[in-house]
């Protein structure tokens, strides 16, 4: 029974969605934030309204928490590798 539980847990981890996109991968100027222009390089069809939906703090920059929340909620999808 224990082996089954471990196997099931491992399978669930593998099947879990991966939100691999990080601020560091998008940030071009090294300030640990993503501007509209930086995000538009990853999402060319990004609109200001969509960016503002991700930028929940309204500071015109997306931080790691905002990016993670947007990915987890499905607001944006990590680009294919």
Image: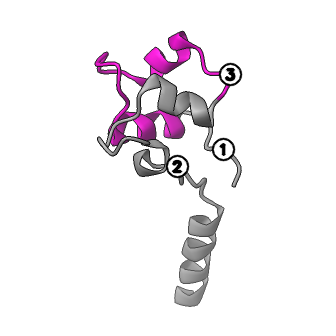
State the residue position of label 2: 21
**Residue at figure coordinates x 61%, y 44% from the top left:** 78
In the displayed orientation, state which residue is furthest to the right. 80
Question: Residue 76, can we see it?
Answer: no
Tell me which residue sits at (58%, 55%) in the image: 18
**Which span of residues is magenta-colored?**
44-72
Looking at the image, which is closer to me, 54 or 69? 54
Which one is nearer the viewer's eye here, 24 or 29?
Answer: 29
Labelled disc at residue 63: none
**Residue 56 versus residue 43 in the image, above or below:** above
Q: Would you say residue 10 sits in the magenta stretch?
A: no
Q: In the rendered image, which residue does mark 3 sit on?
A: 45
Residue 7 seen in render: yes
Residue 38 is situated, as x and y percent measured from the top left of the image, at 49, 32
Side of 1 relative to 70 (left or right)? right
Q: Are marks 2 and 1 in contact (CB under 8 Å)?
A: yes
Please state which of the two labelled residues, at mark 1 or mark 3, is closer to the viewer: 3
In this picture, residue 33 sits left or right of residue 80: left
Q: CA distance from mark 2 to mark 3?
A: 17 Å
The number of callouts visible is 3
Q: Is residue 51 above or below residue 80?
A: above
Q: Residue furthest front?
A: 29
Relative depth, front residue between 36 and 80:
36
Q: Residue at x 28, y 19 (%)?
A: 59
Q: Which residue is mark 1?
A: 79
- Inter-mark Cα distance, 1 to 3: 13 Å
């Amino acid at each position: 029974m224990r082996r089954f539980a471990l196997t099931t847990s491992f399978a669930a981890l593998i099947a879990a969605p991966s939100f691999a996109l990080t601020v560091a991968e998008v940030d071009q100027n090294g300030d640990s934030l993503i501007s509209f222009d930086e995000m538009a390089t990853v999402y060319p069809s990004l609109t200001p309204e969509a960016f503002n939906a991700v930028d929940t703090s309204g500071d015109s920059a997306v931080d790691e928490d905002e990016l993670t929340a947007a990915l987890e909620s499905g607001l944006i999808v990590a680009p294919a590798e």
